[in-house]
Image: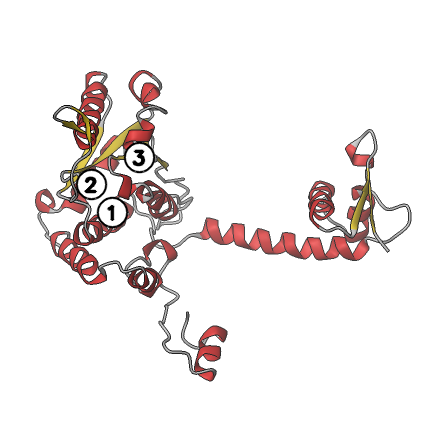
Amino acid sequence: TGVGSDLDKLAQKNGWLARFPMWDWVGGRTSVMSAVGLVPMALEGFDIDNFLAGAAAMDERTRINDFRQNAAMLLALMWFCAGNGRGEKDMVVLPYKDRLLLFSRYLQQLVMESLGKEKDLDGKTVNQGIAVYGNKGSTDQHAYVQQLRDGVLNFFVTFIEVAKDRHRAAFQVEDAVTSGDYLHGFLRGTRAALYEKGRESITVSISEANAFNIGALIALYERAVGFYGSLVNINAYHQPGVEAGKKAATRLLQLQNDVRGKLSGGTGKTAEEIARAIDADPEDVFHVLQHLASNDPRVQISKNEEPSDDKFSLAE
C-alpha cells in the first residue's frame, strides 16, 4: 500500500508483521517487479530471486546503444515496421506453453494501456496503439489460425517458443512422439503456413519456462513498450483513458444513489419521471433502475408493454 495511506496507518496501529510500500508513479501494468507482484509470488513459493535476476540481466541487455544488439529495441522496431508506426496491425500472441497461458492477457494490458493514446507528447491527436489478443498456441491453433492464414491481413503474429518441454518424463502421444513434439511441430508448421501467405511474424524463443527466463521475458516487453513509445512520441506511462473510465463509474454510482433516493412506495415511477426529477439522462437512469430491480429485493418493477413505461417502486 502507499506510505501514509489508511491501510498503512491501520497496519502500523495494529502491529501487522510487515508493510510493503507502493508508489504512485508505479503503474499497475509495470508493477510485476514491485511488492505488488513479488509478495504474492513469494507466498506461492515462486523463485523471486531468479525472477529478478532474469529481469536484471535483460535490463543490461536492453541498455546497449547498438540497436542491432538490443533485443527490446529490435522488438519495438519490428512493431513499428509491421504497423507503419501507426498501429495499423493487431498483435496476435501465440505462446506454445501451458505455463504461459496468461502471458497474452498480461501483454494486452501492458501494450494496450501503455501505447493506446489519443495525444502525442506535442499535444497532437495521433490515436496511437497496438491491439493485442491471443491465448495459447495449442488452443488458438483450432480457433483463428484459419483467418490468420486466409483472412484479412490486419495483424502480425508473435510466436513464443519454449525449447524444453518438461522436467518430468515426457508423455508419449504415439511411438517415439511426445506431446512436446506435437507442440513444436504446430508452432513451426503454423509459422511456415503463415509465411507462405506473406503473413508477418516474430518468434521469441526461451530455453525453458523457469523463473529467470520469465523475469527476462517480462522485462523484455516492458522495455520494448518504452522504446516504441519513444519511436511514436507518446507517453507510455500514463493512462488518461482508464482514469476517464474510473471517473465515469464514480459518477454512475452517485447517480445510483440519486435514483434510489427518488424511489418510493405506491404505483411507482418511470425512468423518465425519475430522470426529470434529478436532471439526468433517461437511458442511464433506466439501466440503473434495471440493475437495482435485478439485485435489490426492495426495488420492485411493474412491467408494461413498452420498457419505457415500466414503473419502479420501493417495497415498504
| Residue 83 visible, this angle | no
Instruction: Say whether residue 252 is left or right of residue 86.
Output: right
User: Which mark sits nearer the N-terminus, 3 or 2?
Assistant: 2
Residue 41 drawn above or below residue 205: below
Instruction: Say whether residue 300 is left or right of residue 15.
Output: right
Label 1, secondary structure: give it.
Answer: helix
- What mark, if any, has residue 75 been given in the picture? 2
Label 2, secondary structure: give it.
Answer: helix
Residue drawn at (37%, 68%), measured in percent from left and top? 22
Density class for disc 3 (Cα within 10 Å; few <14, some 14-19, many ≥20) is many
Question: Closer to the camera: disc 3 or disc 2?
Answer: 3
Colouring scheme, one of rainbow, by chain, secondary structure, one colour: secondary structure
Tell me the quadrant of the picture where the C terminus can be found: bottom right
Q: Where is mark 1, residue-wise?
A: 221
Instruction: Say whether residue 15 is left or right of residue 98.
Output: right
Q: Amino acid at mark 2?
A: Leu
Q: Amino acid at mark 3?
A: Lys
Can you give x and y, in whole percent of width and height, for residue 189 in the image?
Answer: 19, 22
Question: Closer to the camera: disc 1 or disc 3?
Answer: 3
User: Which mark sits nearer the N-terminus, 1 or 3?
Assistant: 3
- What mark, if any, has residue 86 been given in the picture? none
The residue closer to the viewer here, 19 or 248, is: 19
Q: Amino acid at mark 1?
A: Tyr
